[in-house]
Amino acid sequence: MLDATMTQQLKTYLANLREPVELVASLGDDAKSAQTRELLEEIAALHDFVSASFDGTDARKPSFVIRRASDAEKWVRFAGLPMGHEFTSLVLALLWAGGHPPKVDADLIEQVRGLEGDFNFEMYFSLSCHNCPDVVQALTLMALENPRITATLIEGGTYKDEVDARDIMAVPATFLNGEPFWNGKMELAEILSRLDTGAEARAAAKLADKDPFEVLVVGGGPAGAATAIYTARKGFRTGIAAERFGGQLHDTLGIENLPGTPYTEGPKLAGEIKRHVSDYDIDLMDLAKAVKLVPATEKGGLHTVELGNGASLQARSLILATGARWRNLGVPGEAEYRNKGVAYCPHCDGPLFKGKRIAVIGGGNSGVEAAIDLAKIVGHVTLIEYDVKLRADEVLQAKLRSLPNVEIVTSGQTTEITGKDGKVDGLVVKDRQSGTERRIALEGVFVQIGLVPNTEWLQGSGLELSPHGEIVTDEEGRTNLAGIFGAGDVTDVPYKQIVVAMGEGSKAGLSAFDYLIRTEPAADIAQAA
């Protein structure tokens, strides 16, 4: 099961085990069970602290439990093979069960241990899903730290009957005590905030006690991280308030146009950026959603950012880098059938549509790339573009046109997504030139029509926004309000690209530095007077 490279990596990691780990498998007579046995035997052969047995009695076959030999009440179960993106999750489960300390905030660990109640999680993942590992690893950690929490992590391709029975059409899909809990990516802190009713109030109180920053970055994507690194290196007290650190990187798979990095993946890049930020004295406040901006009333004064949990942060200078999100179609049926056939992440949810008919809405690079990838999995792809021609790079268009199971529709306006029995069963598209409509029967719709800036929270603040809702900035990243700067996809700077956002964030950081060294704090000016 493991190639030579993976075997050597795993052997190196297992050297960190501090106490024995047991692998207990429940197997059938099928090929997947044979592969599971082979995998567990290979793992057990790499370290004396790991043992594998095959006398489990769980109804899901194949599946296996990972538990600490000295505390069998704490366990996590994998149903199916955790390979692909989940191989790292498997390694971490082995290490944590073996006493190797997780690299997680100590307060979060104590919060997990202190949870009261019985929490039985079931979570479905696909091996190509780059958002699933965060959920898998969070639930694994919780199960191995609290005996009243169990986690069964299920590879959807192996348990297709369960996926169909539960109407799962998007992953990660998490159930708690048999009921739907959350569909989508969640990190440990987010899960805890939903289980621990006092978590939000404690977080707000902790944030409210912070002294004003010299630089506060709102947003934790490539632009925000670049800004914070630059201002921290200049010696300014810097904080990052991010609703989700890493931003849209978590929703991006292959990245091939970052100079100096021929290929990487969004979640990996987000992790590397986070490690880079942690090298500096930067106060990173994750899960901190900005809901209101109150600008300073005088130059050199303190700007205030109000957060969704009730806390407020203040700073002499602000860099707004809240990014953008996928644009919705805004047609009947889209919201109703979200995660029931309407999807936005082809890499995560594509495997759930194996052999089925799907549509991709959008003829730019994102849409055409999605159609190319999905054509390898699904039965048929209909790509629908509103314009009279596709807007993707020519090399992508040529590849798309070469695929036998793809139909390209231009001048097509999607007017409705239809469904039956709670699932998508088709869409209606109008020819914009002739005005005729036709219904296309299908099982999935992937929306790839661009981005909308996250600026709703800035309404009424006095900050200038473009007709498209973007923050208006000048060539130095300055907004119309002194001491407030914008960077990245949230601004009116053209070309929404990772490398552009990094550059704009760096520029905004340097502009904030220039502003701070040339502007005395308002309090000092008042005292001098």
Image (cartoon, rainbow, N blue to C red):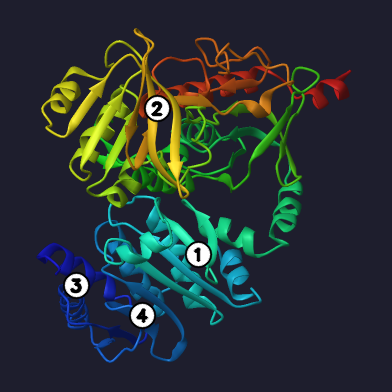
Instruction: Looking at the picture, tell me which residue is in the foreground, 239 or 47.
Output: 47
Distance between the Cα atoms at labels 3 and 1?
Answer: 24 Å
Q: Position of residue 365 (x, y in %)?
A: 29, 25
Distance between the Cα atoms at labels 4 and 3?
Answer: 18 Å
Secondary structure beneath label 2? strand
**Residue found at x 16% / y 74%:** 35
The residue under label 1 is which amino acid type? Answer: Phe
Left-right relation of 172 to 21:
right
Q: Is residue 454 above or below residue 103?
A: above
Q: Is residue 493 above or below residue 506?
A: above
Looking at marks 2 and 1 on the same chain, the residue that comes earlier in the sequence is marked by 1
- Could you classify mark 3 by the number of other residues whose Cα lies within 10 Å: few (under 14), some (14-19), or many (20 or more)? some
Specify whether residue 523 is in view: yes
**Residue found at x 43% / y 26%:** 501
The residue under label 2 is which amino acid type? Answer: Val
Q: Position of residue 261 (x, y in %)?
A: 24, 36
Q: Which residue is mark 4?
A: 66
Question: Which mark lies nearer to you, 2 or 4?
Answer: 2
Distance between the Cα atoms at labels 2 and 4?
Answer: 48 Å
Looking at marks 2 and 4 on the same chain, the residue that comes earlier in the sequence is marked by 4
Secondary structure beneath label 3? helix
Q: Which residue is mark 2?
A: 428
Q: What label sits on residue 175 in the rendered view?
A: 1
Looking at marks 1 and 4 on the same chain, the residue that comes earlier in the sequence is marked by 4
Q: Which residue is mark 3?
A: 32
Q: Quadrant of the C terminus?
A: top right
